[in-house]
Image (spheres, rainbow, N blue to C red):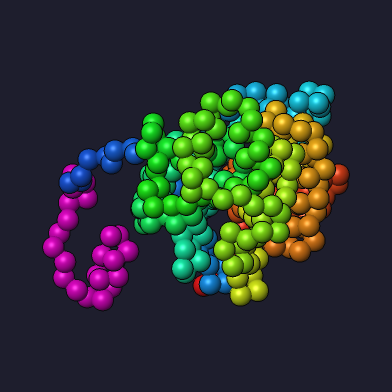
Amino acid sequence: MTLTRRHALLAGATLPLVPAFAPLAHAAADKLGAATPPFRRYNLGSFEVTPLLAGTRVQEDPKAIFAGNVPQEEFEAAAHAAFLPTDRAQGFFTPTLVNTGSELILFDTGLSQEGILAALEAAGHSADEVDLVVITHMHGDHIGGLMEGETPTFANARYLTGQVENDHWSAQQNEGYEGKIRPLLETMSFVAGGDEAAPGITAVEAFGHTPGHMAWRLESDGQALMLTADAANHYVFSLGHPDWEVRFDMDKAAAATRRALFGQIAEERIPFIGYHMPFPAVGYVETSGDGFRFVPESYQLMLNG
Ligand SMILES: [Zn+2]
């Protein structure tokens, strides 16, 4: 106001007199709490790719989760170098929606129906629109949103997952499998590496985190992106140090898979979406030291239009 008034005065205008200490007409605004928008949307060729934040929570004792076989000092040095605390981490759960133009395909479903529906609706979609749900692997934080009680979340969807993964869990008497997967088997199909979920969406075997864990490669009009699911569980500890043992890796072969998959992504210089990377979970990797350096996407994908 000061500038405007002075400029006006300089211009010779007449203004109503305003008392120097006029009381303000509004109260202080309410604080609304920290917030993270639950979706981003990008173009990839003719696909729309939408990472959905279906949940996020604090994880205590990250060393025990992400650095099981590492001396405390080594873990602390890596955390310090990355400006991360050593006592807590923030966990993210990021299913990805892909609209191919003819089908709406959801990769994984988060911890619960509530979480995936909130993110899906924030992104402008409804559960009924989902044509196909792809399950990368059958840990609870990926299959949790498939059902609420006896009711499937995605009423019109069919399902697809890895044959090896299904064979493993179907033989386990696993509560998650019995509650979330078995009721859907009638409309579920099973794939191996190299098979497609839709044109341009190809399964990539990334066994180790679970016995039949799958990554998925998206490719449209010459643009590619890899959905890496849980091939790496932390953007610093797991990518920077692929051999550090992650509590949730069922088979220690996960480390070799991590190296191979992210080695390929680094070489191709394509973006990837990692289910547990910091939201929106999109970035690049370059080889660095004994592992990889995560480079978050900034605006590269926005340039896709
Ligand atoms: Zn997971």
Q: Does 99 lie within the magenta span? A: no
Tell me what residue is drawn at x 16 percent, y 66 percent: 15
Would residue 145 be visible to someone looking at this image? Answer: no
Q: Measured from the top left, where is residue 50 in percent x and y?
A: 50, 57
Which residues lie in the magenta part? Answer: 1-23
Q: Measured from the top left, where is residue 149 in percent x and y?
A: 39, 31
Given residues 254 and 280, the one toward you in this image is 254
Q: Does 11 lie within the magenta span? A: yes
Q: Which residue of the protein is positioned furthest toward the left in this rendering?
A: 16
Tell me what residue is drawn at x 26 percent, y 65 percent: 5
**Where is 9 relative to 110, above or below?**
below
Characterize the magenta stretch by its predominant secondary structure: loop
Q: Measured from the top left, where is residue 238 in percent x and y?
A: 73, 39
- Give left or right: position of 37 versus 271: left
Image quadrant holding the N terminus, namely bottom left
**Where is 30 relative to 265, above or below?**
above
**Where is 142 relative to 75, above or below?**
below
Tell me what residue is drawn at x 64 percent, y 52 percent: 191
